Image (tube, rainbow, N blue to C red):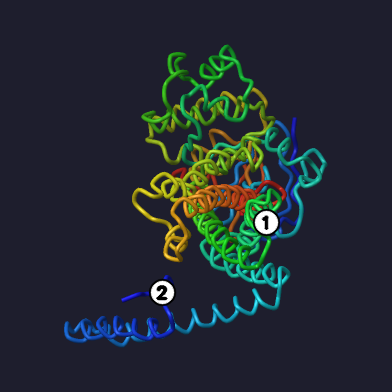
């Protein structure tokens, strides 16, 4: 049988049989999950259909401005999600959105300015998606740790303030710690890439028939850009977050 | 010599009135005690003197200048705070003493240890493992290292065992005799009589009695404890 490099629509339809297998197993084993499996499968299908339609429209009609508009939508959504991790921090959603936006803008800006990636929507949207998602993770952890640290270490921070230290100096040791925590997942993922996980971009390229030599070139760029995006997002979230943590009179909120 | 004036100082937190239009003068070079039952607003009021918090309305003046008109970091170096529980913020005792005075030299650090009644050998010890009394003295020395004109004392001995409490109190009394202005929050009428010159009595956030320590009934009740 001569299969295509990428599934045809008939192939997609046939793959529904796999969902049926999952449903039958869930039903026969009384997992109480059969309904949920169906809902999840339908949801995934509908979401991907919708995204496919949007991307198709963007690539064919909206051009680069459309691509960037879509990126902005992603940044706003990511800002909401990461901002929720910082619940309790003054204006945490603005902080998160700002951090994700900054990290995405600088990372993509460098990649485009150096001509590393094409400035076409077909490239900018998926690459931007990866950057935004990486930045969102780092921002979320940074803000969550910041809120926890400000609550748990309030006495220590106020003791330093009472000695006449600025808010920045009083919070500096905590800030170092929370930024380290925020960057650990990205650092570990970077270390083991290819050994433990075959990352998405590379897998996708290989599946689409691209040679592994080309696929790893792309993946190396992706890993480096994710590293930069996470570090910048954590830094920006820590910097902006810290300003919200303290009043202009150097008081811990 | 540093004087404080409080004018209609009011603090509301989440709709609750904690400090209610307190107007008072705290004389320079004297120790003024803030006393009253739990929840009277004493500690809340104390936090306003070095602007760890700001009043909702009203104002505090230091030597006639509104606190918020001054550089807040400079103000906090003028007005030092010793809290209820010793909170260590650095590694060794020497680092602790340098937390607010990064250029502090060893010589002067040793002087400070002597001033708070601790042995010189303690300077290079780690902060962890110190007793409560020792840690509280380190906190006091750390505050003195900055060179404050005023000491805010928020129940400075209440978390210590009786022996350590008495010793720390004696150290504090020695410092007050040197002319530092002090504001003391205390639950112990005996401590107030031993340490304070003047008393402000708060109840439900309001100033209900004030005067020289000998004239204020609240700290001179029968048996020497609070009514």
Q: Is residue A224 visible?
A: yes
Give the mark nearer the N terminus: 1 vs 2. 2
B55, above or below B145, in the image: below
Q: Residue furthest front?
A: A2
Q: Residue A240 in the image: x percent, y percent?
A: 65, 52
How packed is label 2: few (under 14 Cα within 10 Å), some, or many (20 or more)? Answer: few
Mark 1 falls on what kind of element? helix
Q: Is residue A218 above or below residue A11?
A: above
Q: Position of residue A115 (x, y in %)?
A: 68, 51
Residue B97 versus residue B143: which sits nearer the camera? B97
Pointer 2 residue: A4
Identify the chain of the residue marked 2, using the numbered disc in the image: A
Percent position of residue B187, x then y: 49, 46
Q: Are marks 1 and 2 in contact (CB under 8 Å)?
A: no
Name the residue carrying label 1: A105
Q: Residue at x 55, y 44 (%)?
A: A175
């Amino acid at each position: 049988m001569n299969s295509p490099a990428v599934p045809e629509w008939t192939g997609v339809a046939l793959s529904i049989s796999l969902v049926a297998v999952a449903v039958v197993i869930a039903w026969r084993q009384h997992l109480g999950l059969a309904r949920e499996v169906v809902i999840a499968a339908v949801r995934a299908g509908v979401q991907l259909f919708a995204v496919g339609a949007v991307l198709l429209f963007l690539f064919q009609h909206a051009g680069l401005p459309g691509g960037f508009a879509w990126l902005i939508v992603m940044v706003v959504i990511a800002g909401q999600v990461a901002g929720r991790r910082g619940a309790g921090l003054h204006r945490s959603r603005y902080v998160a959105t700002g951090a994700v936006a900054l990290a995405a803008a600088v990372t993509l800006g460098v990649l485009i300015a150096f001509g590393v990636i094409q400035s076409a929507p077909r490239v900018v949207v998926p690459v931007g998606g990866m950057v935004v998602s990486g930045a969102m993770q780092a921002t979320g952890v940074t803000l969550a740790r910041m809120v926890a640290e400000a609550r748990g270490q309030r006495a220590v921070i106020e003791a330093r303030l009472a000695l006449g230290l600025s808010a920045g100096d009083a919070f500096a040791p905590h800030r170092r710690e929370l930024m380290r925590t925020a960057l650990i997942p990205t650092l570990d993922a970077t270390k083991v890439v290819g050994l433990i996980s075959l990352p998405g971009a590379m897998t996708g390229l290989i599946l689409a028939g691209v040679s592994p030599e080309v696929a790893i070139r792309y993946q190396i760029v992706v890993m480096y850009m994710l590293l930069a995006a996470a570090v910048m997002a954590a830094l920006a979230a820590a910097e902006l977050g810290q300003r919200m943590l303290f009043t202009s009179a150097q008081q811990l909120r | 010599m540093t004087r404080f004036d409080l004018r209609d100082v009011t603090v509301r937190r989440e709709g609750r009135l904690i400090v209610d239009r307190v107007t008072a003068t705290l004389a320079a070079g004297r120790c003024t005690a803030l006393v009253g039952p739990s929840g009277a607003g004493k500690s809340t009021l104390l936090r306003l003197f070095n602007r760890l918090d700001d009043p909702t309305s009203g104002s505090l003046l230091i030597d006639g200048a509104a606190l918020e008109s001054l550089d807040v970091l400079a103000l906090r170096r003028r007005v030092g705070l010793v809290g209820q529980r010793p909170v260590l913020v650095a590694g060794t005792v020497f680092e602790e003493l340098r937390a607010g005075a990064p250029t502090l030299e060893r010589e002067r650090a040793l002087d400070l240890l002597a001033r708070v009644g601790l042995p010189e050998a303690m300077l290079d010890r780690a902060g962890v493992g110190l007793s409560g009394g020792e840690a509280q003295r380190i906190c006091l020395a750390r505050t003195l290292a900055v060179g404050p004109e005023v000491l805010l004392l928020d129940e400075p001995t209440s978390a210590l065992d009786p022996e350590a409490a008495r010793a720390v109190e004696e150290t504090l009394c020695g410092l007050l005799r040197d002319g530092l202005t002090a504001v003391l929050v205390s639950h112990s009428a005996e401590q107030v009589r031993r340490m304070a010159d003047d008393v402000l009595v708060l109840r439900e956030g309001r100033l209900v009695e004030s005067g020289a320590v000998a004239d204020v009934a609240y700290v001179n009740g029968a048996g020497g404890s609070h009514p």
